[in-house]
Amino acid sequence: QQPVQSPQAVILREGEDAVINCSSSKALYSVHWYRQKHGEAPVFLMILLKGGEQKGHDKISASFNEKKQQSSLYLTASQLSYSGTYFCGTESGYALNFGKGTSLLVTP
Amino acid sequence: EAQVTQNPRYLITVTGKKLTVTCSQNMNHEYMSWYRQDPGLGLRQIYYSMNVEVTDKGDVPEGYKVSRKEKRNFPLILESPSPNQTSLYFCASSPTRLADTQYFGPGTRLTVL
């Protein structure tokens, strides 16, 4: 039931862009995105609800295609602070299933 | 300060010795849940609770118990811990149903010898 994330890992230079994908085999009501720094708890980034809307703040945005059961997280002009592991989460009833994560490293 | 607290933060125990990890939130949230995090497996939901006295199994409930007698507390109980329950555990809460921000606690690192 875990959504599938890709890629598993990505290394960027500061200023480059990245896309992280999340797909599910089940119909989606919403998709959550979280970032976790090493040794810390996951921190909320955004939620996208059914309706295909695209959301974002600062240089991080996301899209949600409910027909394809997919979501993508876009990181633009990456900063060193973007490094961490990104998780998508999908709802199934009242349960929340997270993907295995995408490790992102931004280098100077 | 609005927060989710967990105790203990670190615990080393032996196989079979019952333990409880406490979780408390001061935000009057309805939804609470427990996750375990293992390398390469991401976050997996153990149990969740939609409100007081309402709990349900997540993806990996075997070997765990929970209770929700008060809105603010959601303890995780391991009746007979085994080494395969060695993991990093997170408690989280959200204001209402799931389509809402999950606030995570700081985590509890458990080692079962």
Image: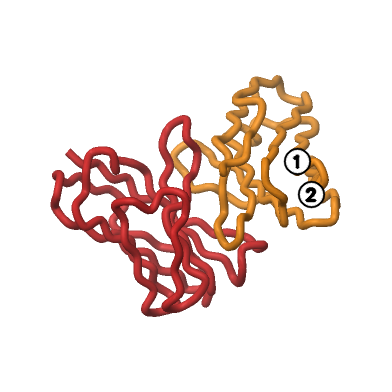
Chain colours: A orange, B red
In three-dimensional space, the C-alpha distance between marks 1 and 2, rounded to whole angstroms, equals 20 Å
Residue A41 x %, y %: 49, 48
Q: Residue at x 54, y 59 (%)?
A: B103
Q: What amino acid is found at the position of numbered circle 2 in the picture? A: His
Of residues A9 and A68, which is closer to you in this image?
A68
**Badge 1 is on which residue?**
A70
- Dot 2 surroundings within 10 Å: few (below 14), some, or many (20 or more)? few
Label 1 marks a residue whose chain is A
Q: Disc 1 vs disc 2: which is toward the camera?
A: 1
Q: Is residue A60 left or right of residue B73?
A: right
Residue visible at 47% across and 35% down in the picture:
B41
Quarter the N terminus of chain A occupies: top right
Q: Label 1 neighbourhood size at 10 Å, few (<14), some (14-19), many (20+)?
A: many
Rendering quarter of residue B4: bottom left
Amino acid marked by disc 1: Gln
What residue is rendered at 54% in x and 35% in y?
A100
Residue B7, quarter of the rendered image = bottom left
Query: At x 57% / y 41%, what residue is drawn?
Result: A2
Residue B95 in picture, x, y percent from top left: 59, 71
- Mark closer to the chain start, 1 or 2: 2
Q: Does B100 sit above or below residue A58?
A: below
| Residue identifier under label 2 | A57
> Disc count in the image?
2
Picture coordinates of residue B80 (x, y %)? 19, 52
Examine the image and state in which quarter residue B69 appears. bottom left
Q: Considering only vertical position in the picture, is B87 above or below A14?
A: below
Secondary structure beneath dot 1 equals strand
Instruction: Pinpoint residue B68: horizontal percent, then vertical percent.
Output: 39, 73
The circle drawn on residue A97 is none
Q: Quadrant of the C terminus of chain A?
A: top right
Which of the pair A39/B74 is nearer the observer?
B74
